[in-house]
Amino acid sequence: MAPDPVPYVGERLREERLRRGVSMRSLARDLGVSASLISQIETGKSQPSVGTLYAITTALDISIEDVFDPPDQRAASLPVGPSAPTTVLEALGSLRGQRVGPLVTPNIRQVLQLDSGVTWERLGQLPRTHVDFLLITYEPGGMSSSSGRLMRHPGAEYGYLISGELILTLGFDELRLTPGDAVSFESTTPHRYHNDGSTPAVGVWFVAGRE
């Protein structure tokens, strides 16, 4: 059986944006992108790149793990914004932050298909922790930023490449990862991943401390 795709990324991002009372134009302005791009992502007409997804989740003060969770249909009809009642938070919390595991087999992994040939598969989650635990695949030509820009986000990043080759631009340095190589760095350091090879690059990644 194939892993379960996560089709509601845009809907989840829109839910969090509205819950915080942030307008589409304001979010787009803060990220330096067009409101049209935000609209296309929220309506599912376009998938965000790795860099754009991290930028949006950082601006909305949510984690990547939150994006895997389904939208809260019960909270959809409740008031949103800064004056929203605590019942919204309680409703959201009742569905989120739950354990994923302890055993997660390949056929039940949740999958995020992102822009620029990048796929994330959720490998597990423990309640009240701040760790993104992912199997990451970069297809040939795949890049973490569709615009080629370096990205920054909260947390510390740990990665281990299983197969293929991956180029990591880290600040002013360019590192070529081959199978068996591992990397670790503060995610606030500008960085970008790119697969310029002819085979997929697959690895296990942790991003810790995204509170």
Image: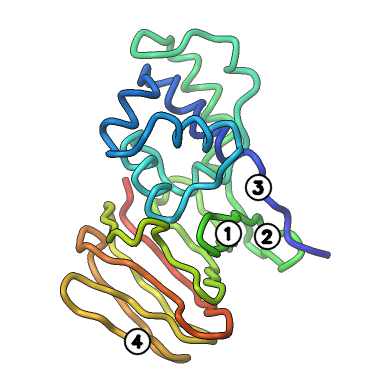
Spot the residue most to the right.
1
* Residue 125 to residue 143: above or below: above
Question: Which residue matches tag 3?
Answer: 6
Q: Quadrant of the C terminus?
A: top left
Q: Earlier in the sequence, mark 2 or mark 4?
A: 2
Q: How far apart are the alpha carbons under marks 1 and 4?
A: 25 Å
SS at badge 1: strand
Q: How far apart are the alpha carbons under marks 3 and 1?
A: 10 Å
Quarter of the view holding residue 95: top right
Q: Which amino acid, mark 3? A: Val
Circle on res. 109: 2
Left or right relative to 1: residue 7:
left
SS at badge 2: loop
Q: Which residue is rendered at x = 53% and y = 27% of the image?
A: 92
Residue 22 percent across, percent down from the top left = 35, 21
Q: Earlier in the sequence, mark 2 or mark 1?
A: 2
Q: How far apart are the alpha carbons under marks 2 and 1?
A: 6 Å
The 10 Å Cα crowd at callout 1, few under 14, some 14 to 19, many 20 or more, is many
